[in-house]
């Protein structure tokens, strides 16, 4: 049985221990019809092979994140859950508090086929055992990527030749500010050079600011999960990173509306040709243009991040899109469903249904022609970015998931841009909030 979608409050929940009911699966509704079609077909196939029934319920990303938070607060839970952002914002907490079960016996068959960094980014700490284990089933992976209008940049410079873009940190960002004025002079009077969000109403701000922290060498947590924010040197680096990020807004290189943007608004702004470049945590911007080959292949280009201030490549957090199996009466059925889904022929169909929005976690699937088209700068740039990964802070300490959920760094950025408070004070306010979160976790 394939269920409905939406936050109606009437959706079935796995609140009992009955083994007679259908397997309840909560799933992020696909951004593209091909994604939804794929998971529905894969589910029907498992039902036919297993003789079991599935209640597959779709939610948009915001709704399924709300459901995940409700689970942490004692609310109802499904047997299996997949949400695009749930792994980053809730996964380590699910594992820490014992809501979900280890998945070694699900993924071990393919353990040698996972790309570097995937297993490390689903290996979480459990409070009761004190041990770290894989606690989810990885399906795909993404990071944040840079996109720009190749043709608008050429028009701004009155040339048909490719424009050389600096790959060093300060020069890279100044390049876009300088070309904003050139584009205005060329007749694009409403355009901005940079399309970065400055709002706390979008998770993108936190995600993108992390690149600036990395570029400035700032470190929030030690490798053993301890906060380093009381260190004066780290505080200075965080201040420098935030001054850097917010300076684009203050210089007028970013839209004044960027302090009001939600998750999709930098996409809309860029695709409306109101910014020369933007950065985004998926390949959804070029992915939205696949029906227009000229726009996808010729007008929009994707590139890697510039080198950090130390001249080294900026490492990236990778966001593993992962499926969780909840503790309950249906664990064995849920694991059977998960094993079915991650068979290469099924997982390949599902991930390709995302139109390249996310990358496969499987080395063998990455060898498919879809992921190796040389003229596709979007997928090639994304592969290079993901390969230069680092572990996200919530892997070291699940308390950092609450920092992400509250969007602490984005709140500070918005305060600087919208209210004009000094960066130093905004950073200190953020540090106070983060330290308070960690102290609360230590007491729990």
Image (cartoon, rainbow, N blue to C red):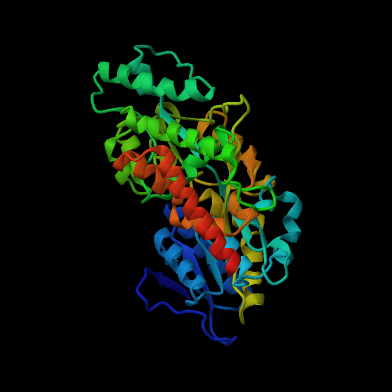
Q: Is residue 245 visible?
A: yes
Percent position of residue 42, x then y? 56, 63
Q: In this view, does 15 lie above or below 365?
A: below
Residue nearest the observer in this picture, 407 or 440: 440
Q: Is residue 376 above or below residue 135?
A: above
Percent position of residue 329, x then y? 62, 82
Percent position of residue 86, x then y? 51, 60
Residue nearest the observer in this picture, 45 or 102: 102
Residue at the image position 36 percent from the left and 13 percent from the top: 157
Residue at the image position 32 percent from the left and 16 percent from the top: 182
Q: Could you tell me which quadrant the C terminus lies in?
A: bottom right
Percent position of residue 352, x then y? 54, 48
Residue at the image position 54 percent from the left and 57 percent from the top: 401
Residue nearest the observer in this picture, 96 or 9: 96
Quadrant in the picture for residue 397: bottom right
Residue at the image position 58 percent from the left and 86 percent from the top: 17
């Amino acid at each position: 049985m394939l269920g409905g979608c939406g936050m109606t409050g009437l959706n079935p929940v796995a609140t009992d221990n009955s083994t007679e009911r259908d397997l309840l699966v909560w799933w992020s509704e696909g951004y593209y019809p091909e994604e939804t079609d794929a998971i529905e077909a894969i589910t029907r196939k498992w039902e036919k092979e297993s003789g079991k029934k599935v209640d597959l319920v779709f939610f948009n990303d915001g709704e399924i994140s709300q459901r995940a938070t409700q689970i942490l607060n004692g609310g109802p839970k499904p047997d299996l859950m997949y949400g695009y952002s749930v792994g980053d914002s809730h996964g380590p907490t699910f594992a820490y508090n014992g809501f979900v079960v280890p998945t070694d016996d699900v993924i071990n068959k393919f353990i040698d086929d996972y790309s570097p960094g995937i297993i490390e980014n689903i290996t979480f700490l459990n409070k009761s055992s004190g041990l770290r284990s894989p606690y989810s089933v990885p399906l795909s992976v993404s990071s944040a990527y840079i996109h720009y209008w190749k043709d608008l940049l050429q028009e701004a410079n009155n040339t048909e030749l490719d424009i050389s873009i600096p790959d060093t940190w300060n020069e890279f960002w100044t390049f876009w500010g300088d070309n904003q004025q050139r584009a205005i002079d060329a007749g694009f009077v409403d355009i901005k050079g940079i399309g970065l969000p400055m709002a706390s109403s979008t998770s993108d701000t936190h995600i993108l600011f992390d690149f600036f922290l990395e570029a400035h060498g700032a470190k929030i947590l030690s490798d053993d999960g301890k906060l380093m924010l009381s260190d004066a040197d780290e505080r200075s680096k965080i201040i420098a990173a935030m001054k850097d990020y917010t300076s684009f807004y203050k210089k007028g290189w970013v839209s004044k509306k960027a302090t009001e943007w939600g998750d999709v608004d930098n996409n809309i702004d860029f695709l409306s040709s109101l910014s020369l470049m933007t950065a985004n945590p998926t390949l959804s911007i070029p992915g939205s243009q696949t029906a227009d080959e000229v726009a996808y292949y010729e007008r929009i280009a994707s590139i890697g991040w510039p080198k950090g201030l130390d001249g080294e490549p900026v490492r990236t957090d990778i966001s593993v899109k992962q499926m969780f199996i909840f503790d309950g009466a249906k664990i064995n059925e849920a694991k059977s469903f998960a094993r079915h889904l991650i068979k290469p022929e099924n997982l390949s169909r599902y991930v390709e249904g995302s139109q390249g929005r996310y990358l496969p976690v499987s080395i063998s699937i990455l060898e498919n022609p879809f992921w190796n088209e040389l003229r596709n700068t979007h997928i090639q740039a994304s592969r290079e970015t993901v390969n230069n990964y680092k572990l996200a802070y919530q892997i070291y300490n699940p308390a950092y998931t609450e920092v992400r959920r509250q969007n602490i760094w984005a709140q500070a950025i918005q305060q600087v841009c919208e209210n004009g408070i000094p960066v130093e004070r905004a950073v200190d306010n953020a540090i106070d909030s983060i330290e308070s979160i960690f102290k609360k976790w230590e007491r729990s």
